[in-house]
Image (spheres, grey):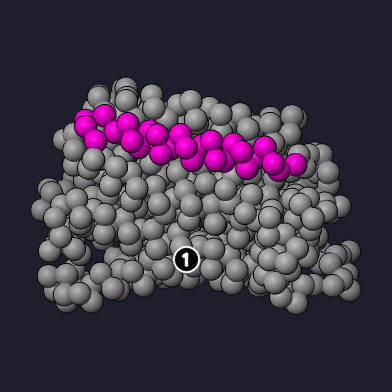
Amino acid sequence: MHDVRTVRAPSMLRLAAASLAGTAIEFYDFFVYGTAAALVLGPLFFPTFSPVAGTLAAFGTFGVGFVARPLGSVLFGHIGDRHGRRPVLVASLLLTGASTVAVGCVPTYETIGVAAPVLLLVLRFLQGLGLGGEWGGAVLLTVEHAPAERRGLWSSFPQVGPALGFLLANGVVLGLAATLSDEQFTQWGWRVPFWAAGVLAVGGLWLRSSLAESPRFLEIDDHARVPLAEVVRDHWRLVLLTAGALSVGYAIFYAVTTWSLAYATERLGVSRTVMLTCIMAAVLVKGLLTPVAALFGDRWGRRPLCLAGCAAAALWMFPMVALLATGEPLLMFLGFLGAMLAFITMFAVIAAYLPELYEPRVRCTGAAVGYNLGGVLGGALTPIVATALVEQGGRVPWGVGAYLTGVALLSLGCFALLPETRPVPVVAAKPAMD
């Protein structure tokens, strides 16, 4: 048995900051690809396609990252459950950072032909593989150090990381779009944010180099030999329910941040700068309110907030697409803001909720697989489905509103079947769906 007494408890603020920085960097890598897919990758890597087909193809490579994420959660979840949470943080950050820098170096279709989109596909897969491991490692290291009564608050810091990564990625793209001509941005400017990922990865590795291992992991006497096998055998229903429950969060986020960017610039003629500003403003509010919503989760429970967020999302999707279709910056921002508020009501508490649902010996695998399968259902499909639905509708994309509402109702049903976990201490949590 490991001697837990030899583990020095880190400052929770320092630990939370390191987790936040790491998730911000990895999600920066992931989001910068989504923005590039919406703006330039179609014509550069799929020039023989029509504009709409090129965008769909670019979103297809975007979706490959989500398909890879559950595989990454299996790979890194195995490491996390067998060898510790800390090694996951280093390995996943290295993989995601290196593959993102490589995307910025891939020649276009004009230079190397069909090899260009193939390379893009492979590197996007590796990006997703790394990110699939990141969330579980960062969240568990924070959750398993945090006091039970403030577990929701401290675990919300890694959940701020995606907002920060998105703002950083799109801030860089916005700055380039504002200072470069369209020709310069298309020729080389879009590559700069990918190259910047290398610098960020080095900084993230330095921040994480001195973090202590989770004391809860060190207390486990009998580690799972094959964590995935135990999860599939004993917790398969819980995995499916959590994946379905989380799909609405991904659907909302990528409808706002990726699909709407392509829709408004291509169909409505709204400038890239205006769209990125509207989206970034809504995501900024979402990031700022994440710890506040997490405090509510510590006070009132995880499940009530998740149910409320799903209900709000179901009610807001039609108004959101109607406001988007106006092309008016203020109205589009209001539509995005409502969606982001519904989103964060759920996702602020997810980092505490999911680990509390699984027993410690398979927690890294179970929580990460459920989380990332939700990404496949909600994040990978939404830009593709929404783009296809727009082609069959009028100016207002009511079909997209119906699709997002349907996903919200599906998630609402899944959350209704999950139990409450607060204030059960994470060390004593039992598999809720056995």
Whole-percent x, y for residue 198 in the image: 40, 65
Viewer-proximal residue among 262 and 179: 262
Name the residue furthest front. 392
Looking at the picture, does residue 35 appear above or below residue 344?
below
* Membership of 102 in magenta stretch: no
Residue 101 appears left or right of 67: left
Task: Answer with the quarter of the image where residue 413 lies.
Answer: top right
Magenta stretch in the rendered image: 393-419
The residue drawn where x is 68% and y is 66% is: 232
The one nearer the camera, 420 or 175, is 420
Q: Please state the total of marks drawn on the protein image.
A: 1
Q: Residue at x 10, y 53 (%)?
A: 183
Describe residue 14's horizontal placement relative to residue 110 as left or right.
right
Identify the amino acid type marked 1.
Ala
Question: Looking at the rendering, in which quadrant would you find the C terminus?
Answer: bottom right
The prevailing secondary structure element of the residues shown in magenta is helix
Instruction: Give the x, y percent position of residue 44.
Output: 17, 61
For the question of whether residue 198 can be seen, the reply is no
Q: Which residue is under mark 1?
A: 68
Q: Quadrant of residue 397?
A: top left
